[in-house]
Amino acid sequence: MSSAPYLIIFDLDGTIVDSQSNIVRAVKEVAAALGVEEPPLAQIPLVIGLTLDEALLRLFPEVRAETHQHMEATYRKIFKRLRSESDYQEPLFPGTLEVLDALDEEGYLLGIATGKARRGVDQLLKRHSLEGRFVTIQTPDKAPGKPHPGMILNALSETGVEPGNTVMIGDTSFDILMAVAANVASIG
């Protein structure tokens, strides 16, 4: 690696951790709690990575705007409850720690850009003993959600790394579109 810094930005849900079953469960519980029809199961994974409000708008387009605000609060309450259950799991994908270790040893700067709120990111990193591994953590709390390039642009600004020395790794088209909009390479 040259002396110029390189930044590798990871998505979180679906890239570093397997959270799909928890998200599906929470969406189904939201629908039941509010008495609305569940979205088709195949649609739920397609919105993972978006901000919560955008994901719910896409999953429940027929629901009135004021109900969407209530849905978001209900989802957060349900997800908080799920996280506190003894059987809650949000495992790292196999090989994740080894990849992070190898990249760290090579001197790459590591970052996160996710649709998950910062509080959820912090809890997840703590649960997996990953605190301090990432030099920049970008969430929709401080920048527009994917596919807007704001989170990547903030990461570049925080680290001083040039777009040409940055790659975004994610599992959805939203990750790739965000990378393209920020003029950085992508893998996904």
Image (cartoon, rainbow, N blue to C red):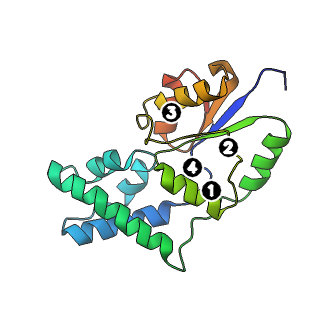
> Callout 3 environment at 10 Å: few (<14), some (14 to 19), or many (20+)?
many
Q: Which amino acid does label 2 sit on?
A: Phe
- Across and down, in percent, residue 149 comes to 47, 28
The residue under the point 23% across, 53% down is: 69
Kindly indicate whether the residue at mark 4 contacts the one at mark 2 (C-beta within 8 angstroms).
Answer: no
Foreground: 160 or 170? Answer: 160
Q: What residue type is labelled 4?
A: Leu
Residue that label 1 marks: 125
Residue 172 in the image: above or below residue 84: above
Kindly indicate whether the residue at mark 4 contacts the one at mark 1 (C-beta within 8 angstroms).
Answer: no
- The disc, 3 or 4, on the residue closer to the chain's N-terminal end is 4
Identify the secondary structure beneath mark 3.
helix
- The disc, 1 or 4, on the residue closer to the chain's N-terminal end is 4
Q: Distance between the residues labelled 1 and 3?
A: 18 Å
Q: Distance between the residues labelled 1 and 2?
A: 10 Å
Residue 77 in the image: above or below residue 1: below
Q: How many labels does the image show?
A: 4
Residue that label 3 marks: 151
Give the number of the disc on residue 12: 4
Q: Distance between the residues labelled 2 and 3?
A: 14 Å
Q: How far apart are marks 3 and 4 (CA)?
A: 13 Å
Residue 41 in the image: above or below residue 116: below
Residue that label 2 marks: 134
Identify the secondary structure beneath mark 4.
loop
